[in-house]
Image (cartoon, rainbow, N blue to C red):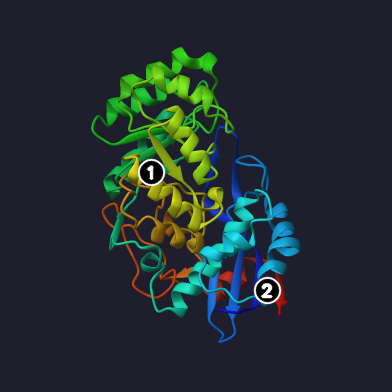
Amino acid sequence: MIIKEINIRKMKMTMKHPFTTSFGTFQEKEFLLLEVKDELGNTGWGESVAFHSPWYSEETLKTNLHIIQDFLIPLILGKEIGHPDEVSALFGSIRKNNMAKSTVEGAIWDLYAKCNKMTLAEALGGKLDKIEVGISIGIEENVEDLIELVRGFVEEGYKRIKVKIKPGYDVEVLRELRKRFPDVPLMADANSAYTLKDINLLKQLDDFNLTMIEQPLASDDIIDHANLQNELTTPICLDESIHSLEDTRKALELGSCKVINIKIGRVGGLTEAKKIHDYCMVRNIPVWCGGMLESGIGRAHNIALTTLPNFILPGDTAGSSRYWEEDIVSPEIVVEEGFITVPLNYGIGYEPNLKAMDKYTVEEINYKA
C-alpha cells in the first residue's frame, strides 16, 4: 500500500445521555476521524479516542491533531507500507502520544484488511463470529436511577455490568446493586479516585463478589496497586496504568493486577494491543476491551480486536443506540441478547455513513502526496 491521501475530520456529536465518572461529566463528544487512501483509491478509517480535556490522560483532541498533522502524517504520506505492524516502527521516534498514533495506525489496519480481502478480525488473527459485551454506566444522581438503568440492561441481555464509583459513591451503591441483582456479573471502575489511605474502604468491596475493581489507584502507579492487590480477594484490573507491553510485563511481575483492560488508543494501536493480548494469554491473565465512548468507527475496531481468543471477559463495546441517536456507520452496531455479531465485510466491516458524517463534521483537512 502506498499512502497517497489522508483526510481528517473534526467531529462533534451529542450523546443521548450525560456520562459521569470520577473525573467529570460531559455530553458533547468531540473527536477526530482519519481516512487514508492508497494509490488504487482504497480507503481505511481510524478514530481518535482522546477527549477534549486531559481527564483520562494527558492527550486531548487538540494535541492529537497537532501530533498527527505535524509529525505522524509526514512519516507515512507517500510511503509504501507492506503491513500495519510497520507503522509502530515508523512512529518510533515520537514519544508517547499513543492515541494520536492509534488513530493513524487504525486507519492503515482497515485499509490493509480491505486490500487483502479480509475482515479486520481475520487480519488480526481473530476467530470468533460473535463477541460477548457488557455495559458501562456512569455515576447517577441517585441509587434508584442507577438500579433502573441496570435492570434495563440486564433485561436486554448484557453479559456484565460496570458501574463507575468514587469516594462517597461506592460501598452503599454496590451493596444495593448486589442486593437487587445477586447473580449479575458486576464490576466497579474507580478511574484512579482512591489512594492506599482508603484501603479499609476498598477491602469492604470484597463483600460484593465483584468480577474486578478497575484502576482504583493512581493512573501512573503499579507499586501501590501491588500492595492493594495483596490485601484484596477481588481481582484488580489495570486500565490507565498500562500503555504498552512493557508496562504489562512489569505490572504482572509485581502482582499489581489479575486482569488487564486493553484499550486500543491507550496502548498506541492494534499492533501493541495484540502483543499485550498474546503476552497475557501465555501468562493466563484474562483481558477485555475497554471503551472510550467511541462512534461506530472506533467501536468497529474494538469488535475486531475482541475476536482474539484471550478476550474472555465481556468488554465495554455496547451497541450504537446506547450512546447515539444516530451513529456514523451503516448498519449501526446492534447488541442482541448480550452479543454483537462480527461483520463479514472486508476491513472494519461497517460502511461509513457519509451523509451522517457530514452532518456532524465541524472541519475537514486534506493532505495529498
Residue 300, located in which quarter of the rendered image?
bottom left
What kind of element bears circle 2?
Answer: loop
Residue 298: % across, % down: 50, 60
Residue at 41% of width from left, 71% of height from top? 349
Front-lying residue, 186 or 260: 260
- Say few, some or many: other residues with alpha carbon within 10 Å of mark 2 (under 14 / 14 to 19 / 20 or more): some
Quarter that holds the N terminus: bottom right
Q: Residue under circle 1? A: 280
User: Would residue 249 be seen by someone viewing this image from the given angle?
Assistant: yes
Quarter that holds the C terminus: bottom right
Up/down of 224 relative to 92, above or below: above
Q: Which mark is residue 252?
A: none
Front-lying residue, 254 or 343: 254
User: Would residue 352 be seen by someone viewing this image from the given angle?
Assistant: no
Front-lying residue, 289 or 243: 243
Residue at 37% of width from left, 55% of height from top? 306
Up/down of 308 relative to 159, above or below: below
- Say few, some or many: other residues with alpha carbon within 10 Å of mark 1 (under 14 / 14 to 19 / 20 or more): many
In the drawing, does residue 189 fall left or right of residue 342?
right
Q: Earlier in the sequence, mark 2 or mark 1?
A: 2
Q: Residue under circle 2? A: 77
In the drawing, does residue 127 fall left or right of residue 144?
left
Front-lying residue, 110 or 277: 277
Residue 246: % across, % down: 52, 42
Residue 180: % across, % down: 28, 29
Which residue lies most toward the bottom here? 40
In the drawing, does residue 368 fall left or right of residue 358?
right
Residue 70, located in which quarter of the rendered image?
bottom right
